[in-house]
Image (cartoon, rainbow, N blue to C red):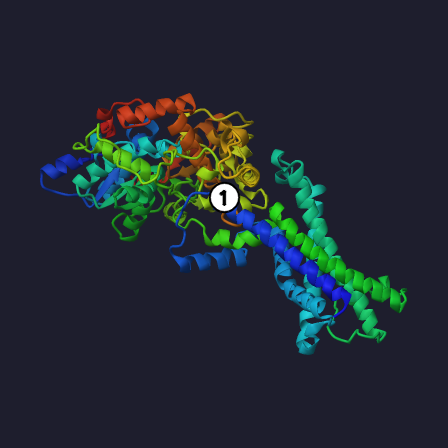
Amino acid sequence: MGIGNIVFIIILLAASAAFGYQASKIRRNILLGKDLDRNDRKKDRWILMIKVALGQSKMVVRPVAGIMHIFIYAGFVIINIEVLEIVIDGIFGTHRAFAFLGGFYDFLIGSFEILAFLVLFSCVVFFTRRNAINIKRFHSKEMKGWPKSDANLILVVEVLLMFAFLSMNSTDYLLQQRGADHYIAAGAYPISSLMTPMFEWMSTDGLIIYERSAWWFHIVGILLFLNYLPISKHFHIILAFPNVFYSKLQPAGKFTNMDRVTDEVKLMMDPTADPFAAPPPTDSDAAPEKFGAKDVQDLTWKNLMDAYSCTECGRCTSNCPANNTGKLLSPRKIMMDTRDRLEEVGKNIDKHGPEYNDGKALLGDYISEEELWACTTCNACTDACPVNINPLEIIVDLRRYLVMEESKNPSELTGMFTNVENNGAPWAFPQADRLKWAEEF
Amino acid sequence: MNEAIKVPTMAEMMASGDSPDVLFWVGCSGSFDDRAKKITKAIAKILAKAKVKFAVLGTEEGCTGDPAKRAGNEFLYQMQAMMNIQVLDAYEIKKIVTGCPHCFNTIKNEYPDLGGNYEVVHHTQLIQSLIDEGRLTLQGGGEFKGKRITFHDPCYLGRANDEYEAPRSLLEKLDAELVEMKRCKSKGLCCGAGGAQMFKDAEPGNKEVNVERTEEALQEKPAVIATGCPFCNTMMTDGVKHFEKEGETQVFDVAELIAKAADL
């Protein structure tokens, strides 16, 4: 085992540990959310995950982006087999450890190359689409600054990684042809063999230096990228799967029932209830839970997982009737705000402990009332999301807090509430007139 | 056919020791809004024509609580829901047909959590089954034969409950030319009324949602914009007025089209 292998093992362990640490923080943050049982109907959940996450069924609704996304996704999943070989080579100092597979190895390397090329091609197209073509959803307000750089950085890194991979193979292929030591003839190189004119002028030593450098750049790049995921929207490549698995399975129109409200309403409607009775004893001295959500901890863990699963593609927002007609609401911003606030809460816990209150909240400091009241609850956003994120649940939970805790709602809605309460209809018509239509035949 | 139709209330039916096969849940729009009342009457005519034994709650019906719930007022929603469930259970209601997708969604999906369990269908679903069973027959499409009709999917029927085919299959019975808007079915654009928006002004923006949607519908040059929701009907009607196209394009509920075609 040479010094290179030891260095490699240290880098590999450090990168894995760092990623594990970051992932555990995200897990902790998600679990700050309220309990919710999403472990029913396991079979339906697996089928949904296979269809929507693994099968990308909602991505291809927009064919251009959808198909190219599948190239990148397939490339990511399948090229990981190659990464496994690279890791084995790195640890044991072998070269192309899987070469003994013979014809199958040729097939594997050949497929990796074609996929790598497709990934590279798609990333270049995506980069151009994002920056040179005026696609509205990539240029909205919430996409300025970090979200824009994040998106571009991901694409540039993927292009560099794929180029490193292909040029590594190209120089390896040349070295194999020149019969260089250590470079056993193995693999098929449908793409990188076309790149040899770029490297043919090099001496054998030069080729070896390039091949080794590209190898190191590729694998260290992947490990660094792995540690970039947790601070990036790109974390969706991991969370997309559990996030779809834990989707809401009921009809989209069904909103959650607030059981605590049910208890109180039942008491109100019970003629035998004693209005002066002491509340039932509770075994904790915790402050009573609020109605609806003011901050991220009041949302469910699934809402918070949604926030970390969002890759800011903007399909929700581009389908949103409110956003389409110039209102402030953008469902994507709701998700980005939720994640930003949750990150802030997480950092506060790290710094000052779990009891710390920074005096800020998701509602007000991040999401405004104007955004919330523009929603028509039409479910276009939840339908459009390729990984089944639900911005609508967050919007409604924040509205619940506004209405039930703060009595803050547009004044016309106060009128509607009063009418429903007094006349049993949202308009001020007397209940006695309900059957008037039947007299009009 | 235009003779008076007897619309029995549950109270009357109960008093005579009878019970209906289906309760017609009219909804607030269908009870009070002059335009929506026409839809209600069309549904009642169809039910009567198909000899469906139905009844209404009449003055005992109250708002399902849908707009309160969507606006975040869970207390008010649950008060309404529990009062309605008490009435429905007292009359031992098993099956409900609604004239409004919002009532449909709320009773079907949200009342069970409060103990109200009923078989709930939207009026387009019921009419479709009446035609399938041969209880209602149409002699061609009447005045709509060959006309261009586009269907605007109500969010609470379509995306919320995955029902896209029942209203379309009824329109096909009219021998009309069914044209789809650019955004239709699961991609259909909201009319702008849901989520309690019906009862308030829109937030500041550059366009009203119903204008955006009507514009899209009018691009198909339809003689009729069909809907299955009284709120959508209001919004699309206002949209057509906005573009001053009342001369070329009319807005009808699917039930009204069927009633007209069946000469009711």
Q: Which corner quadrant of the image does residue A140 belong to?
A: top right
Q: Which corner quadrant of the image does residue B58 belong to?
A: top left
Q: Name the kind of residue labelled 1 in the image.
A: Leu
Up the image or down, A434 lies above or below B131; here it is above
Front residue (pair B182, B107): B107
Point out residue B194 in the picture as x, y percentages from the top left corner: 42, 34
Quarter of the figure that contains the C terminus of chain A: top left
Chain of the residue where label 1 is placed in the rendered structure: A
Residue at horizontal 70 percent and vertical 67 percent from the top: A91
Tell how many labels.
1
- As drawn, the residue found furthest toward the left would be B16
Up the image or down, A133 lies above or below A16; here it is above
Point out residue A22 in the picture as x, y percentages from the top left corner: 59, 49
- The answer to whether A433 appears left or right of A66 in the picture is left
- The answer to whether A331 appears left or right of A162 in the picture is left
Residue at horizontal 50 percent and vertical 54 percent from the top: A242
Up the image or down, A367 lies above or below B156; here it is above
Label 1 element class: helix
Point out residue B245 in the picture as x, y percentages from the top left corner: 48, 29
Per the image, the residue denoted by label 1 is A304
Other-residue count near label 1 (Cα within 10 Å), few / some / many at <14 / 14–19 / ≥20 = many
Front residue (pair B27, A315): A315
Up the image or down, B157 lies above or below A438; here it is below
Mark yes or no: residue B214 visible. Answer: yes
